[in-house]
Amino acid sequence: MSLIQELTNRDKVFEFLVPAQSPVDVRHGPILYLEGVNVSFDGFRAINNLNLTIDDGELRCIIGPNGAGKTTMMDIITGKTRPDTGSVWFGSRHNLLTLSEPDIASLGIGRKFQKPTVFEALTVFENLELAMATDKRILPTLTAIMTTEYRDRIDEVLEIIGLKELRLALAGILSHGQKQWLEIGMLLMQKPRLLLVDEPVAGMTEQEMERTAELLTSLAGKQSVVVVEHDMGFVRSIARKVTVLHQGSVLAEGSMDQVSNDPEVIKVYLGEEA
Ligand SMILES: Nc1ncnc2c1ncn2[C@@H]1O[C@H](COP(=O)(O)OP(=O)(O)OP(=O)(O)O)[C@@H](O)[C@H]1O
């Protein structure tokens, strides 16, 4: 190929056009890797030698009794809490312990907290638009050119979250479940590689839970999804692999059937519910 042909090759992405953050590298390993992580709060060890590996495209459920360390684990991944010791890697290139919370978010780790935080006075469409506008990776000078691309992305996300018909509705009139899906959609606008979802079905109707199960399973593959959830029926309906946390460590890992038949798990967790 001649130099001219090479320079005008539209399929090629030139280095200078690539956003500052390098993409996550999962060619030789998992998308998320925690090893030997410890966190103490005033002498109490909330996370105790935690090891966890999430594969690219995986949907993983994390369960565990109250105080097991699930929220603290999410806080560590997103940079909100710094561990005392251990390693936390996003792909093989990004050491998350050296990055700030906003940097971790812009690398492609999105977090959905339990309570929906949509802008109620704005429409569904505007909420998604706003989520896109906060994407710091977008070069302002390119915004005009990319408008069509972003509109297409909003349409795509509306389709994924099942709110296409409600695009012009105010977010304030949505049901609890619809608000949760909209917020997941707002995260999707940033095209995350890893989504952390905290108790997505708390307060949902049976029907909304079914729709949420479909939504989360449809997201896996395209991105990795880690779901912390207390509702065992829901976990059973979506989980391929479940990790049970207890006292800040992994107590068991495997299919829902495997972990729910594990005597240790029954003793410390499922037994608690019986
Ligand atoms: N900032 C903090 N200061 C002191 N103790 C904390 C702090 N954050 C968490 N803890 C303690 O660490 C332990 C783990 O808490 P964490 O919230 O991570 O558990 P969890 O598994 O998310 O529980 P739940 O299911 O109730 O949300 C708990 O005993 C909690 O009281």
Image (cartoon, rainbow, N blue to C red):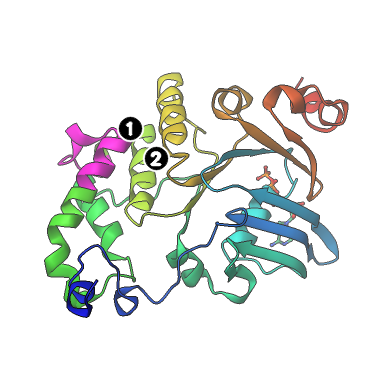
Q: Which residue is mark 1?
A: 175
The reply to whether residue 91 is visible in this rendering is yes
**Is 121 inside the magenta-drawn segment?**
no
Along the line of sight, the residue nearer the viewer: 105 or 240: 240
**Residue 254 pos. (x, y %):** 72, 32
- SS majority, magenta: helix
Q: Is residue 161 magenta?
A: yes
Q: Nearer the viewer, residue 198 or 10?
A: 10
Under tag 1, what secondary structure? loop
Frontmost of labels 2 and 1 is 2
Q: Which disc is residue 218 wearing?
A: none
Quadrant where the image shows the C terminus: top right
* Residue lying at 71% horizontally and 21% vertically, measured from the top left: 257
Magenta stretch in the rendered image: 154-172
Q: Residue at x 22, y 56 (%)?
A: 129
- Decide if residue 130 is on the left or right side of residue 241: left
Residue visible at 74% across and 46% down? 67
Identify the residue at image location x=50%, y=38%: 200
Say above or below: 201 vs 126: above
Q: Mark number for residue 180?
A: 2
Q: Amino acid at mark 1?
A: Ser
Instruction: Give the CA separation, mark 2 to mark 1.
Output: 9 Å
Residue 120: image x %, image y %? 27, 48
Residue 122 seen from this side:
no
Residue 269, horizontal then vertical, whole percent = 78, 31
- Say what amino acid the circle numbered 2 marks: Gln
| Label 2 SS | helix
User: How packed is label 1: few (under 14 Cα within 10 Å), some, or many (20 or more)?
Assistant: few
